[in-house]
Image (cartoon, helix red, strand yellow):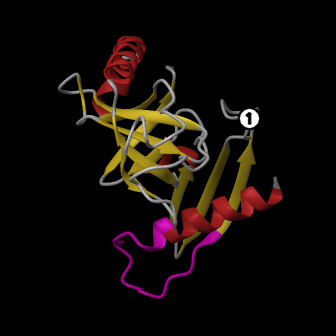
Amino acid sequence: MIKQLVATVLCVSMLLTGCDSTDTNANATYRVQSIASSGTGAGGEAPVRIKLSTGGDVAQADLSSIVAFVQIVAKREATKRQAIVAAQRARATVARMNPGQRAKTRYIAVETERSAPNFDSQPATYVEGPTSAARGPAPAFERSVMLWDTQTQTLVGNAVYDIKSTPPKGSSARFESFTAQYVGAGL
């Protein structure tokens, strides 16, 4: 828990120092004013709110402003069944979102049926590590997800991403050039 908290503080401070600032002092140092944790989040983690300050300016951030690292072990063309399941789950999720959530969430990453355990039956266009994309068993992965565009109400391409570990539900995660809110099988 302490390691996660320290990592979060470091990520937030790096995030804030990388942003443009109205502060003319380019070497400003951020100080942690407070760290608050309450309850348990959807992924079992404790939601953390961090308050930072520098030279009279105060900035606040929480885990929702941090983009999670998602390790993609394989990218494949989705089967018809994977696309159908992902679209159904995405539509149901978007229907449950309030208008404010929909307005600020362009893409969601929705869980679909697991990809085939072997590349012979569902080839990959990208594979992490030494495994050949042409044949053989797929690397170990936890979930298969697809991206949904909440504005156009369509799947983003026909790619399914096999991911090594699942980000916390509701967090932002990066999938190639898209940043999407991870919703799992639905909110």
Regarding mark 1 in the picture, which secondary structure is present there? loop
Residue 127 position, x and y percent, is 44, 56
Identify whether 86 is placed above or below 1: above
Circle 1 packing at 10 Å, graded few (<14), some (14-19), many (20+), is: few
The part of the image, by quadrant, that contains residue 103 is top left
Q: How many marks?
A: 1
Residue at 51% in and 29% down: 114
Nearest the camera: 110 or 127?
127
Horizontal side, residue 22 vs residue 14: left or right: left
Nearest the camera: 156 or 36?
156
Say whether residue 25 is magenta: yes
Residue at 34% in and 72% down: 22
Residue at 47% in and 73% down: 17
Residue at 52% in and 76% down: 55
* Residue 66 appears in the rendering: no
Horizontal side, residue 171 vs residue 34: left or right: left
| Residue farthest toward the left in the current orientation of the protein | 152
Quickly name the residue at label 1. Answer: 44
Q: Amino acid at mark 1?
A: Gly
Residue 154 position, x and y percent, is 22, 24
